[in-house]
């Protein structure tokens, strides 16, 4: 599914030198490496500020808190996403409100959000998730935000380097959250995250909150948390930031090859999201406004679980992102959602299958993956 060792082999000398520099200075918390990473990542994104923190989950919470999300507030997000998208809302004391996804892209559906807006209490914020590395429809969400006066908090955990209409994820809303978990396109060697924004005051608030609500040691203006990105991770991220455009381009090339190989098999029908015995694979849509960076390459698959077991027998790794939508998670039972709610999210949970993708994946390995899938459906 993912071979991190191949990437490491290509940059290990650069990484070793960067880590040695941190060890030589013994400056592990804050300091020049973190400052430099924040400057360089902000410049890359085209944002005023990019503030490092301990994880992508913390980045979501810090972003929501900086936007003024408080107990009793309501925040919309999709139920087909990683758990942290909604748990970060509850960490602020607010209530997650779910809206269904677009079946073509699996991203939050603006029309579903508008229905919630028109039939519910005011929302403090909407959190579109740029799922699998493709930005949500930010034109539609920007228009809705102006109409209904809510903050857009981008969950860009999977989208470092993705763009919408030429603007990078992380600059499309009021604030955004990134994850640098080791499997991400821009990844640390452990947990890490960041909050990006063009609002200088909001960035200052995030910097205080990640450091116990303090800008001066032992003086606490707010009750914050310990959520700092350490210097070793910042040093690694600085090295990888130099390569991210090339790696994302390689992912896009691999995704295009997958599309080509699948279409050659006759297993797919162009432009449809339905699957059946005659067309057992459906490809997700890439919007023309989006520069998709393919954190994951995901398809819909007929008899998905049987196919996955077959591929496992062939030594091919796969993953399901995500098998249980959030509205059906036990921890969110208090929201009162029912199994029939959000049907597109439930269908995606039943049918989605992520195939191997990473920058160093070879074409012969892709051919093996697609050939095995064709064997399953034609045997």
Image (cartoon, grey):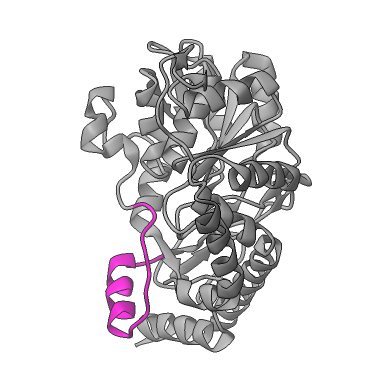
Q: Quadrant of the N terminus?
A: bottom left
Vertical order, 208 against 300 (above or below): above
Q: Nearest the camera: 122 or 356?
A: 356
Q: Does the magenta stretch include residue 305?
A: yes
Q: In this view, does 23 lie to the left or right of 321?
A: right
> Does residue 354 show up?
yes
Q: Position of residue 215 (x, y in %)?
A: 54, 21
Reply above or below: 303 against 236: below
Q: Residue furthest right?
A: 166
At 67% across and 64% down in the image, what residue appears? 243
Region of the chain picked out in magenta, as a range: 301-322
Residue 82 point in image, percent of width and height:
40, 45
The residue that appears at 56% across and 84% down in the rendered structure is 362
- Asked if residue 251 is among those painted magenta in the image, a careful observer would answer no
Q: Quadrant of the C terminus?
A: bottom left
- In the rendered image, residue 74, in percent from the top left (x then y), is placed at 44, 17
Q: How many labels does the image show?
A: 0
Is residue 187 among the parts visible in the rendering? no
Q: Which of 270 and 176 is in front in this view?
A: 176
Left/right of residue 22 with respect to residue 167 in the rendered view: left
Above/below status of 151 relative to 250: above
Q: Where is residue 305 in the image (x, y as percent from the top left)?
A: 29, 66
């Amino acid at each position: 599914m993912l071979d991190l060792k191949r990437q490491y082999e290509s940059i290990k000398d650069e990484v070793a030198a960067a880590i040695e520099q941190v060890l030589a200075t013994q400056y592990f918390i804050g300091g020049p490496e973190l400052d430099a990473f924040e400057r360089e990542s902000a410049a890359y994104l085209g944002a005023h500020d990019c503030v490092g923190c301990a994880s992508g989950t913390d980045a979501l919470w810090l972003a929501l808190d900086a936007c003024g999300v408080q107990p009793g507030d309501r925040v919309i997000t999709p139920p087909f996403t990683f758990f942290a998208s909604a748990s970060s809302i509850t960490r602020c004391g607010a209530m997650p409100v779910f809206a269904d996804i677009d079946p073509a892209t699996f991203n939050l559906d603006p029309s579903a959000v508008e229905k919630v807006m028109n039939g519910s209490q005011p929302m403090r914020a909407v959190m579109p998730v740029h799922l699998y590395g493709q930005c949500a429809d930010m034109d539609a969400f920007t228009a809705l935000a102006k109409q209904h006066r809510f903050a857009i908090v981008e969950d860009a955990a999977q989208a470092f380097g993705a763009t919408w209409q030429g603007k990078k994820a992380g600059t499309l809303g009021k604030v955004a959250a990134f994850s640098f978990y080791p499997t991400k396109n821009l990844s640390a060697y452990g947990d890490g995250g960041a909050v990006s924004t063009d609002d200088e005051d909001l960035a200052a608030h995030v910097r205080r909150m990640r450091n116990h609500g303090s800008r001066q040691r032992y003086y606490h203006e707010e009750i914050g948390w310990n959520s700092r990105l350490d210097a070793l991770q910042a040093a690694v991220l600085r090295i990888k930031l130099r390569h991210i455009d090339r790696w994302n381009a390689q992912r896009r090339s691999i995704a295009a090859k997958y599309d080509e190989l699948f279409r050659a098999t006759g297993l797919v029908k162009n432009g449809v999201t339905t699957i059946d015995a005659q067309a057992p694979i459906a490809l997700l849509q890439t919007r023309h406004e989006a520069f998709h960076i393919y954190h994951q390459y995901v398809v819909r698959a007929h008899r998905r679980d049987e196919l996955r077991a077959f591929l496992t027998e062939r030594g091919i790794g796969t993953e399901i992102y995500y098998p249980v939508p959030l509205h059906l998670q036990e921890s969110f039972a208090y929201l009162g959602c029912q199994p029939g709610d959000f049907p597109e999210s439930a269908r995606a949970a039943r049918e989605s299958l992520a195939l191997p993708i990473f920058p160093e994946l070879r074409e012969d390995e892709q051919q093996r993956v697609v050939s095995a899938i064709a064997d399953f459906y034609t045997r």
